[in-house]
Amino acid sequence: MILRDWSATAAPEGAGEYARHFTAAVLPRLRALPGFHSAFLLTRTDAGLVRIRVLTVWECFDAVRALAGSDPTVAAVEPAARSVVLDYDRTVTHFEIADLPPVAPDARP
């Protein structure tokens, strides 16, 4: 599995607009792509600005390429998203998700 990591910074109002855009436009498109597994929209407010982080999980790197095209490191940021954030990453970072054994409920510290 592959995790795709992208971030942006917004004013509080812009962060709310971005969340609405992500829910209404981005998620439906992602869910329609083969190999899409899940998405997380994370936010953190610091000094009056909101840090936005989007993590998407994909079955394999070929599925990522179906979304991102020939250079999957380039961030695909729609004009509607760019208009509500102050700054955003132009590239994304990919991580392979380690296949770890499950933790039994009684094995937790």
Image: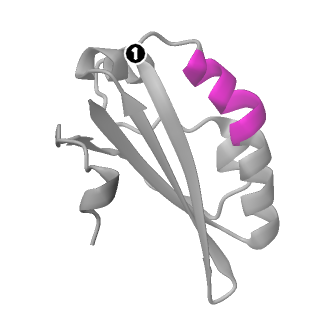
Residue 30 is inside the magenta segment: yes
Q: Nearer the viewer, residue 26 or 39?
A: 39
The picture places residue 71, in percent across and down from the top left corner, at 28, 26
Position of residue 67 in the picture relative to residue 82 (left or right): left
**Which secondary structure dominates the residues rendered in magenta?**
helix
Relative to 49, residue 78 above or below: above
The picture places residue 90, in percent across and down from the top left corner, at 42, 48
The picture places residue 8, in percent across and down from the top left corner, at 54, 59
Q: Tag 1's secondary structure?
A: loop
Which quadrant of the view contains residue 60? top left
Identified at 34% across, 54% down, the residue is 105
In the picture of the structure, the residue carrying the numbered disc 1 is 35
Relative to 85, residue 20 above or below: above
Relative to 43, residue 30 above or below: above
Identified at 24% across, 60% down, the residue is 107
Magenta stretch: give its range: 22-31
Position of residue 37 in the picture relative to residue 52 (left or right): left
Identified at 32% across, 21% down, the residue is 59
Which quadrant of the view contains residue 22? top right
Residue neighbourhood size for the residue with mark 1, other residues' Cα within 10 Å, grouped as few (<14), some (14–19), many (≥20): some
Visible residue check, residue 106: yes
Q: Which residue type does callout 1 highlight?
A: Gly
Relative to 80, residue 63 above or below: above
Position of residue 26 in the picture relative to residue 77 (left or right): right
